[in-house]
Image: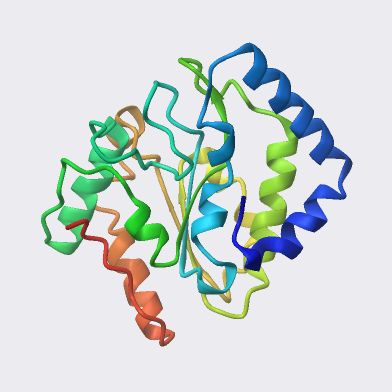
């Protein structure tokens, strides 16, 4: 379910009244509708990326809502699945920012999660073909707890907040300690308005990590 380093966090969350409401809601949703990702992948980001090793947090909106795409890591799709348009825009900005070439045949971002990039959406589940269908107070409460926990970590962390739903969590981050990079969401509608392309979040993040004696992230996927 999650890496042992997150045990204390999840034990605390499970004591809250909203947790049982959340689990009951998910029981009903998964029983009555097609929901993404699969139930066992909801907390996948917390399983792959240990708390003490987090360098960067990427916070998006909610999971992909078409079959075969969402697998528990924000913006990522399983190997062999065509890249969604938002992920294509992420790759384009990595290329523009770092002067590298990405492999557009692979949309699996597990390689980033394994380097200390916590890939999260502000809502962890979604009904098929119904974006933002799982907006609920328990997600807001849960992510306030996530951000507070990360903010208290000793290591310096870069918070990449992509889109206005992610921007609302700025108050839970100490900007004097960590780096906050706010941009538009990389979805086509948002990215093409400006505020995504040429914002250089990936080089800015690595520069911050170097300045604080932390190893940088290799953003190239091949």
* Residue 64 can be seen, yes or no: yes
Which sits in the foreground, 113 or 191?
113
Across and down, in percent, residue 58 comes to: 45, 53
Where 30 sits versus 152, above or below? above
State whether residue 40 is above or below residue 206. above
| Nearer to the camera, 2 or 88 | 2
What residue is at 31 percent from the left and 35 percent from the top?
Answer: 86
Does 159 appear above or below 215?
A: above
Q: Is residue 204 left or right of residue 14?
A: left
> Could one spot residue 193 in this view of the protein?
no
Residue name at image x 41 percent, y 58 percent: 113
Residue 122 in the image: state x and y as whole percent: 57, 41
Image location (x, y in percent) of residue 20:
83, 36
Q: Is residue 104 left or right of residue 176?
A: left
Q: Which picture quadrant has residue 75? A: top left
Residue shown at 51%/39% (left/top)?
164
Of the 4 image quadrants, the one containing the C terminus is bottom left
């Amino acid at each position: 379910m999650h890496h042992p380093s997150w045990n204390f966090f999840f034990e605390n969350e499970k004591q809250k009244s909203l947790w049982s409401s959340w689990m009951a809601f998910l029981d009903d949703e998964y029983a009555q509708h097609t929901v993404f990702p699969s139930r066992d992948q909801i907390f996948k980001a917390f399983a792959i990326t240990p708390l003490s090793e987090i360098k960067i947090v990427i916070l998006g909106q909610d999971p992909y809502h078409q079959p075969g795409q969402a697998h528990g890591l924000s913006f990522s799709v399983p190997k062999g699945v065509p890249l969604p348009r938002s992920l294509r825009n992420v790759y384009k900005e990595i290329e523009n920012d770092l002067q590298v070439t990405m492999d557009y045949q692979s949309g699996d971002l597990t390689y980033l999660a394994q380097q200390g990039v916590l890939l999260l959406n502000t809502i962890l589940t979604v009904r098929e073909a119904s974006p933002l269908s799982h907006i609920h107070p328990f997600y807001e409460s849960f992510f306030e707890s996530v951000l507070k926990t990360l903010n208290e970590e000793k290591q310096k962390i870069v918070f990449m907040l992509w889109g206005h739903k992610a921007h609302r969590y700025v108050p839970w981050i100490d900007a004097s300690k960590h780096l906050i990079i706010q941009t538009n969401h990389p979805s086509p509608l948002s990215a093409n308005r400006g505020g995504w392309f040429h914002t250089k979040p990936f080089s800015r993040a690595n520069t911050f990590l170097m300045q604080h004696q932390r190893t940088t992230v290799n953003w190239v996927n091949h």
